[in-house]
Image (cartoon, rainbow, N blue to C red):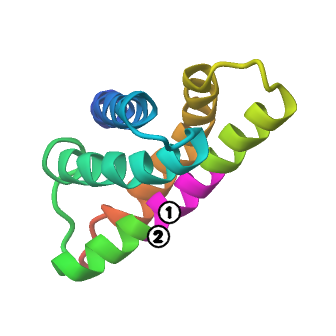
């Protein structure tokens, strides 16, 4: 339960990074929500990797490169799920504010991410 709570904190920080970068890009650049989100997602992914590695799960017993690859794989899959839901919501309901679509899509991708990170990335190998 402690890891889930910490994961939600790290995810909350990632959400703030994602939403903050998206908001800044929408406000200060000509980028729309789709390009803005393609930039904000990697920013959030980097922030959550640092937090999950040092605060939530602890460092894995894999090399930094292997851990990073696994984290990136789960994160990219989760981000694609998140982005697909985000885009679908905006395309089916054009009057929906991007921040609402971001919130709903991010919530839906959380369970997938927790399972992937805890079981595939940061799971420590058991000694026989």
**Residue named by callout 2:** 73
In the displayed orientation, state which residue is furthest to the front.
30
Query: How dense is the environment of label 1, judged by Cα within 10 Å: few (below 14), some, or many (20 and up)?
Result: some
Q: Nearer the viewer, residue 111 or 20?
A: 20
Q: Nearer the viewer, residue 56 or 34?
A: 34
- Res. 128 visible in picture: no
> Residue 120 sits in which quadrant?
bottom left
Residue 57 within the segment the image draws in magenta? no
The residue at 21%/66% (across/down) is 60
> Residue 55 sits in which quadrant?
top left
Q: Which residues are magenta?
A: 73-81
Residue 57 % position (x, y): 24, 49
Query: How dense is the environment of label 2, judged by Cα within 10 Å: few (below 14), some, or many (20 and up)?
Result: some
The residue at 23%/81% (across/down) is 65
Residue 36 % position (x, y): 48, 44
Q: Is residue 16 above or below residue 71?
A: above
The answer to whether residue 86 is left or right of residue 18 is: right
The residue at 55%/54% (across/down) is 78
- Res. 111 visible in picture: yes
Q: Nearer the viewer, residue 110 or 61?
A: 110
**Label 1: element kind:** helix
Residue 32 % position (x, y): 57, 40
Residue 96 % position (x, y): 72, 19
Q: Nearer the viewer, residue 33 or 128?
A: 33
**Residue named by callout 1:** 76
Looking at the figure, which quarter contains the C terminus? bottom left
What label does residue 86 carry, if any?
none
Provide the major secondary structure of the magenta segment.
Answer: helix
Dots 2, 1 in contact, CB < 8 A = yes
């Amino acid at each position: 339960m402690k890891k889930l709570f910490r994961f939600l904190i790290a995810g909350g920080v990632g959400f703030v990074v994602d939403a903050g970068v998206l908001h800044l890009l929408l406000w200060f650049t000509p980028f729309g929500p789709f390009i803005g989100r393609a930039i904000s997602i990697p920013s959030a992914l980097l922030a959550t990797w640092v937090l999950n590695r040092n605060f939530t799960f602890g460092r894995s017993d894999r090399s930094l490169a292997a851990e990073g690859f696994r984290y990136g794989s789960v994160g990219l899959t989760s981000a694609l799920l998140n982005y697909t839901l985000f885009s679908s919501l905006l395309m089916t309901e054009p009057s929906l504010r991007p921040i609402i679509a971001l919130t709903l899509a991010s919530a839906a991708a959380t369970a997938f991410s927790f399972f992937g990170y805890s079981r595939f990335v940061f799971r420590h190998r058991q000694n026989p």
